[in-house]
Image (cartoon, helix red, strand yellow):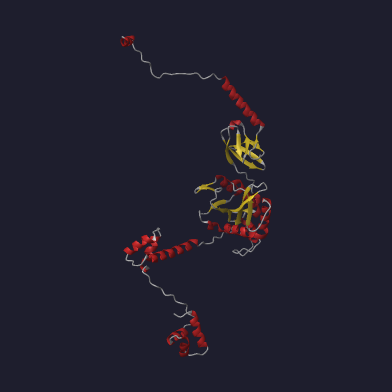
Amino acid sequence: MLTALEHMDIHFLKRQGHSVRQIARLTGHARNTVRAILKAEGLRPPQTRQRSTKLDNHHDYLRERAAIGLSAVRLLGELQARGYTGGIHAVRRFLAKSEARHCAAAAATVRYETGPGEQAQVDWKHVGTFSDAQGHPVTITAFVMVLSFSRAIFAKFVTSMRLPVLIDCHLEAFAFFGGVPASILYDNMKQVRLGPQRWNPAFLDFAAHCCFEPKTCRPYRPRTKGKVERAIQYLDQSFLLGSSFTDLVELNARGRHWCRHTANTRLHATTQRRPDELLALELAHLAPAAQLRPYAPALARKVSAESLVAYQGGRYSVPPEHVGTGVSVTSLAGRITIRSGELVIAEHAPVAKGRCQINPEHLQALWKQTVARATAERHAPPPRCHVAFTQAVEQRPLSVYAEVAG
């Protein structure tokens, strides 16, 4: 079979005025071969010869049986029963090629584009563990939200991934973008989902308050939220890599500047538009962030025997009649509010971890209740021993004892 270069040589010699006989003599090819190449218009693509193998009649059977996980050794025995006379190496090569094609097909992903205001995607990025001024290790994580239509990015760096922190990050992102999307896509983070079929009720309460629909991607399928995955890679390469920061305040200040003046002003490779320009169009389809009412997540707690409720490391007093009952605690505008049902039973200023905030009235009521209980126990008559016979005592005549004695 002639190569493409040999085809070009024959056409080149013909353009120089050589005859078919001369071209055949110069190239060493038969005259009929030269004539056939010259009659063809342009270069013929090289034809690959299809080699027949002993497995040709067993391809469909192999694919069907390999799909259930059978090994090459097992398949070789089955093929030999079907008349196969080749070796195991051919079977293994076929299985390897089939597996490669399967992996390539599984990796193929259709890009899913959403309209303006329809979706945002959220994820965490581990930044690293660093030492604070006292030498204590501090783990820093980045919260990243990207609007799927405009590709506008918001990032905030935090030292905790607890639910209250996640909620605060959402509220700051909504204020940064100027609105709330219709839905937000997450992976299966425990702050959002407690299990395969269990949503975190506290997070659902926040989503209902902000009027967006939370969604989660399939486990082990990160490409479903590829927009935020690529935004995290861009954050790492464009902002974090090779940079240094004095503290968390500076990191967040420079990160906010990077979002506004670098990430959201670049020409995006997919949309071929600047994210801030598309965000201006998307704002009309976002629920206005300015209309969001202040949100205070309600956390369930149980009142201890000391008439105290634990919340974020501190303890707060309630009236003693609620000891042992369930209450809900919220924090809003610098006040800790404790409710029993819909009734507010206590309000306190927040305290540091390990400290107590006790209302004197609650303490006095608890003291009175304790004294009354102690007084009642002191004046109560002491318990006495009481024996009750459930069966009647058998009575025997004296003559029976006389006989035994005699």
Above or below, 46 against 18 in this view is above
Above or below, 349 against 282 in this view is above
Residue 111, x across and y down, in percent = 54, 61
Residue 298, x across and y down, in percent = 59, 42
Residue 351, x across and y down, in percent = 66, 39
Residue 288 visible in the current orientation: no
Residue 336 visible in the current orientation: yes
Residue shown at the point (68%, 56%) measured from the top left: 257
Q: Nearer the viewer, residue 386 or 212?
A: 386
Q: Is residue 126 left or right of residue 55?
A: right
Residue shown at the point (59%, 24%) measured from the top left: 374
Number of on-image labels: 0
Q: Quadrant of the N terminus?
A: bottom left
Residue shown at the point (53%, 58%) measured from the top left: 223
Q: Is residue 146 left or right of residue 395?
A: right
Q: Nearer the viewer, residue 205 or 63?
A: 63
